[in-house]
Image: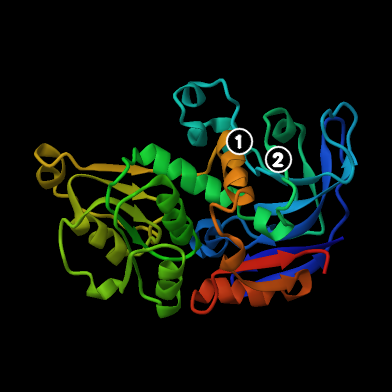
Amino acid sequence: MRIAMYYANNDVRVEEAPKPKIGDGELLIKVIASGICGTDVVEWYRRDKVPLVLGHEIAGEIAEVGAGVKGYKVGDRISASHHVPCGRCHYCEMDHHSTCETLRKTKFYPGGFAEFLRLPEINIEKEGVYKIPEGVSFEETTFTEPLACAIRGQRLGGYKKGQSLLVIGSGISGLLHIQLAKVKGFGKILATDINEHRLKAALKFGADEAIHAKDLKEEKITDFVILCTGAKSAFEQAFKAVDRAGTILVFASADEGYKYHLPINEFFWRNEVTITSSYAANPEEHLVALELIRDKKINVKDMITHRFGLGDIQKGFDLVASAKESLKVIIEPQK
């Protein structure tokens, strides 16, 4: 089968690899659509791990069913979590499934940028496989994982209805947060970015105001800040913009090696500012995401700007890495 082997953002090669063989309790998935995530182009994070096959925002059909698997059959349309929590450790019991050691070790093989992938038994046992609802396309389904992450982030951030919101970074994560915030009943939603194309998208998908990041000068203007970019300037902007009793949700990795000297008294002694973070999502949040997509409460279809067959995946990575003209780029491994 064909796979897309990642060596660097500008070096993604289409290669041949054996089609995965499944064992008892496993599933073989024919990948129909796979989204390129912004984390797929964070080069420094996987510098010591290459080469590897990326792709975790997947949708496809079950091609083979291993012995003992119940509830699934060949031809079922599914999405799947690449990480699954154990559900019984200290972290899971504390509702912090993303910090579970099992979640950090699990994955599917070889990755979503391949014609086929193998879902290990644990992914199925821990309810990390989701049937696609009728009326939802494969490409729409690729948004399940990123939307689930946004759902988790806003939940952990402890949003309150009517709070004002600032979304810093209007890429896919930012746009999903904006749409989700509208559904949840946030108050005024302000979005920033340094790209005019994305600022227009922020308005299209529900922001009340979208301004260039360099033009946001005001301080203490919002109750809730969601950081969807890891630029140093974005962190500085978040710390200035959050109001007393506000919350900053860190939803993106920072630039490599970045450290910030935080004025402790200003934030925590009298102003009761909360700084928190979120990573990944649990199976329940994936199901909620699929329901929101099914019910058209979150418009993901119009966020797709580019589609490429596996043979042209480098074009997709170039677009996502440059972050100039694209929103969501979908790879279709069967083409």
**Disc 2 residue crowd, few under 14, some 14–19, many 20+, Cα 10 Å:** many
Q: Position of residue 254 (x, y in %)?
A: 38, 57
Give the tally of numbered discs. Answer: 2
**Disc 1 residue crowd, few under 14, some 14–19, many 20+, Cα 10 Å:** many
Q: Which of marks 1 and 2 is nearer the N terminus?
A: 2
Q: Is residue 251 visible?
A: no
Q: Which of 121 and 15 is in front in this view?
A: 121
Q: For residue 283, which numbered disc appears in the image?
A: 1
- Asked whether, in this view, residue 119 is left or right of residue 314, the answer is right
Q: Position of residue 81 (x, y in %)?
A: 65, 42
Q: Position of residue 50 (x, y in %)?
A: 63, 59
Location of residue 131 (image quadrant): top right
Give the secondary structure at mark 2.
strand
- Which amino acid does the dot numbered 2 rest on? Tyr
What residue lies at 24% left-to-right and 62% top-to-bottom?
A: 237
Q: Mark 2 points at which residue?
A: 130
Q: Nearer the viewer, residue 312 or 161?
A: 161
Position of residue 67 relative to residue 35, above or below, is above
- Asked whether, in this view, residue 175 is left or right of residue 334, the answer is left
What residue lies at 56% left-to-right and 20% top-to-bottom?
A: 88
- Asked whether, in this view, residue 276 is left or right of residue 104, the answer is left
**The C terminus is located in which quarter?**
bottom right
State how far apart marks 1 and 2 are (Cα).
Answer: 9 Å
**The N terminus is located in which quarter?**
bottom right
User: Do residues under tags 1 and 2 come within 8 Å of each other at their CB atoms?
Assistant: yes
